[in-house]
Image (tube, grey):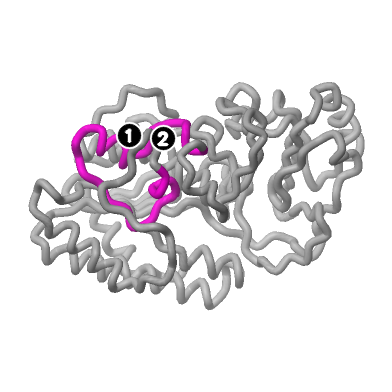
Amino acid sequence: MYHAQHLLDLSGDGVRAESMLPSFPSVTFPNHYSIVTGLYPSHEGLVGNSFYDASTKQFFNYKGKTSTDAVWYNGGTPLWVLAEQQKMLSASFYWVGSEAAVQGIRPTYYYRYNEKINIHDRIQTVVNWLSMPPEKRPHLITFYFPQVDHQGHKYGPNSPEVAEAVHLVDSSVYELTKAVKTTGLNVNYVFVSDHGMTKPDIDNPIPPPTGIDTSKFIVSGDGLLVELYAKDPKYIQDTYNQLLSNQTADYAVYLKTNVPAKLHYGATDDRLNRIGDIVLIPNWPKVFNLYNTKFTTIGWHGYDATVVKDMHATFYAWGPAFKNHLTIAPFENVNVFPLINQILGLTYTGKVDGTKLLANEILK
């Protein structure tokens, strides 16, 4: 859309997907972690950017201290943990979960998330890592750019500010590839985004549905996903029936037991007991406004990517492991985990939602 020419050229020599489907809900923390664990959010445990854990009666919030507490990352094994377990060093210049001691392990080299380090210093750090002697060199590096997401939220996905952010990432990736070449190493690159962005109707939000009683339920979420956790199971069915009777075409109401299977967000998928007993999901372009908030965010994400194309994410890959000049059809982001495992020669015996079909299609 914004002619990110370096990325188009680099991926043109390698592999380019028409798009990549984020998992539901299509928000940041769940999808960062799905990419590196190969599991849907309901299986890896990060079911939202913020959510309630009914088992521990605690709230998770991605902006709080909980974001670096390993107790929340207890589903699946992220790529850097798997690498370190198999005596392969890893490094992270930011990724969701990399600051937490998941299974007691962090990347050998990692940074606590902040946006004060300029891009040139970040790139030089990667070059420094790759210039280390083999026994100290990381073979897996994660790297994150927040700029497009930030500007998309603030100004909307069709704004000049987003175009500028895209070009910043584009030029930075090009600078990274040039700098890495000086090490003499032939490196593989996988370029992904965690979600897309859309401009919903924030001027006419959905008011609080009649039937939500905070004396009977703990309420989590707003905007694109509302979850109700019953303080006593006896309240669930009557409240659901009331919500259903007042439901409009702007949103859907589900019991956890009847959430559409394609979302992988229902009772049978809720391995860590973190999904609400009742789930309310708006239909694009609508959003909820439970708390009479004045929305200042123009760009949003979180909708079902199988319905809202704007939610689709990016996948580009190039380097010695990848086939050349290949364009592939959209696929689910949980398939990235088996791909990286195969490139690095790692072994994983646990159950994941991703398959090796992507790896078989795009690797030489």
Mark 2 to mark 1 CA distance (whole Å): 7 Å
Where residue 311 is drawn, which disc sits there? none
- Magenta residues (range): 72-100
Image height check: is 192 above or below 203?
above
Which residue was labeled with disc 2?
A: 38
Residue positioned 64% across, 28% down in the render: 55
Quick check: can you spot residue 352?
yes
Say which of 28 and 233 sits in front: 233
Q: In the image, 346: left or right of 331?
A: left
Is 17 within the magenta? no
Badge 1 element: helix
The amino acid pointed to by label 2 is Gly
How many labels, in total? 2
Dot 2 falls on a residue whose secondary structure is loop
**Residue at point 32%, 38% (across, down):** 81
Apparent side of residue 36 relative to residue 219 in the rendered image (left or right): left
Residue 338 — which label? Answer: 1
Above or below, 172 against 340 in this view is: below
Q: Is 85 part of what is drawn in magenta? A: yes
Classify the position of the C terminus by image quarter: top left
State the residue in front, 69 or 343. Answer: 69
Please tell me how crowded label 2 is: few (under 14), some (14-19), or many (20+) other residues with Cα within 10 Å.
many
Pointers 2 and 1 in contact (C-beta within 8 Å): yes
Q: Earlier in the sequence, mark 2 or mark 1?
A: 2
Q: Residue 211 placed where, x, y %?
A: 90, 39
Where does residue 16 sit, x and y in percent of width and height? 34, 52
Q: Relative to 224, is 119 above or below?
A: below
Q: Position of residue 343 (x, y in %)?
A: 22, 39
Residue drawn 14% across the image and 49% down it: 136
Query: Tag 1: residue type?
Result: Pro
Q: Position of residue 174 (x, y in %)?
A: 27, 68
